[in-house]
Amino acid sequence: MKINSTTTLDPDQVAFPSDSITFTGVTKSYVTEGEPFLAIDNIDLAIRQGEFLAIVGKSGSGKSTLMNLIAGIDRATSGSVHVGGQTLTPLSEDQMASWRGRNVGVVFQFHQLMPTLTVLENVMLPMDFCNVYRAKERSQKATALLESVGIADQAHKFPAALSGGQRARVAIARALANDPPLVIADEPTGNLDSRTTDAMIDLLRQLATDGKTIVMVTHERDIASRVDRVITLVDGRIAEHQETSDV
């Protein structure tokens, strides 16, 4: 699939074209204590639509920065980032937030559920921000998502009453609230037991099978071997690509 690098879509549109994610010569640097720190160093990368990709590497290798660049949370210092045909560079902060809310779902490492909202209300929250669905539809949509991850019976409980595995399921349901074509998962299994980890990977695998693009940051190579492709970062550079058949 070919991306037209000059294309800039309406960031409010919900549809996500069937193009891959592409990085061309992307660098990201920060200034820390007055000194520049190169987090991502001249990366070229293409991610296919519907691919389940794992990003692995040691702490400080650039995994989180790369994830944030894909999600439009960070901006590249140089180079170009295209996600689903959308060129991210020219978007204003407001446009970026609108585009991200409708096109990217994020599963955070520690779930980051709102403790004063019920499970159902947590899943509805992104819908309220983005207005993708009419207000009267949101509860039904959120309930259906909770059913899809096997946790609808917990809808009216608060997050503190749930186990770690249940909270992880809620986090996935919330990430899917606006039916985004791209899901970013930041260490989604880092605090889960092996059985719950297997269930989470199966859920993410099914989303990729259904056509969503899944990008997962993880330290765990045994998990990474269950995805379509693994890229290994070392000091902000891609040191290795491995297809599943090679892992």
Image (cartoon, rainbow, N blue to C red):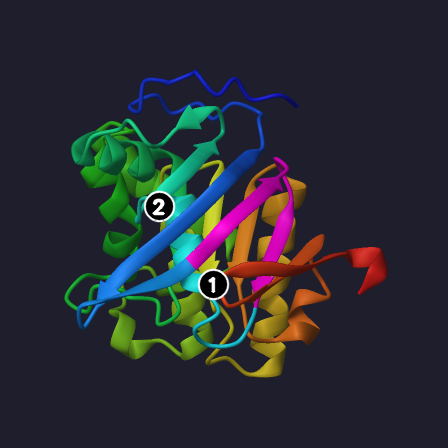
Is 87 located above or below residue 189 in the figure? above
Magenta span has 43?
yes
Residue 152 seen in render: no
Q: Within 10 Å of the Cα at label 1, are there few (<14), some (14-19), or many (20+) other Cα atoms?
A: many
Q: Point out the stretch of residues depicted in magenta.
A: 40-56
Quadrant including the C terminus: bottom right
| Magenta-colored stretch includes residue 5 | no
* Near-viewer residue (102 or 94): 94
| Residue shown at the point (28%, 71%) measured from the top left | 159
Q: Residue at x 46, y 32 (%)?
A: 82
> Quick check: marks 1 and 2 in contact, CB under 8 Å?
no
Separation (CA) of disc 1 from disc 2? 30 Å
Instruction: Identify which residue is drawn at 40% across, 27% down.
Output: 87
Q: Report the magenta stretch's main SS.
A: strand
The answer to which quarter of the image holds residue 100 is top left
Q: Camera-side residue: 70 or 178? A: 70
Residue 44, given in percent of the width and then of the height, sits at: 57, 43
Q: Quadrant of residue 46?
A: top right
Mark in the foreground, 1 or 2 = 1
Residue that lies at the very extreme toward the right in this rendered image: 245
Q: Secondary structure at mark 2?
A: helix
Which labelled disc corresponds to residue 197? none
Picture residue at 39% right of the left edge, 58% below the top: 65
**Where residue 48 sits in the image (x, y, percent)?**
64, 37
The dot on residue 63 is 1
Q: Which mark is residue 142?
A: 2
Name the kind of residue labelled 1 in the image. Answer: Lys
Q: Please determine whether, in this image, residue 144 is positioned above or below residue 217.
A: above
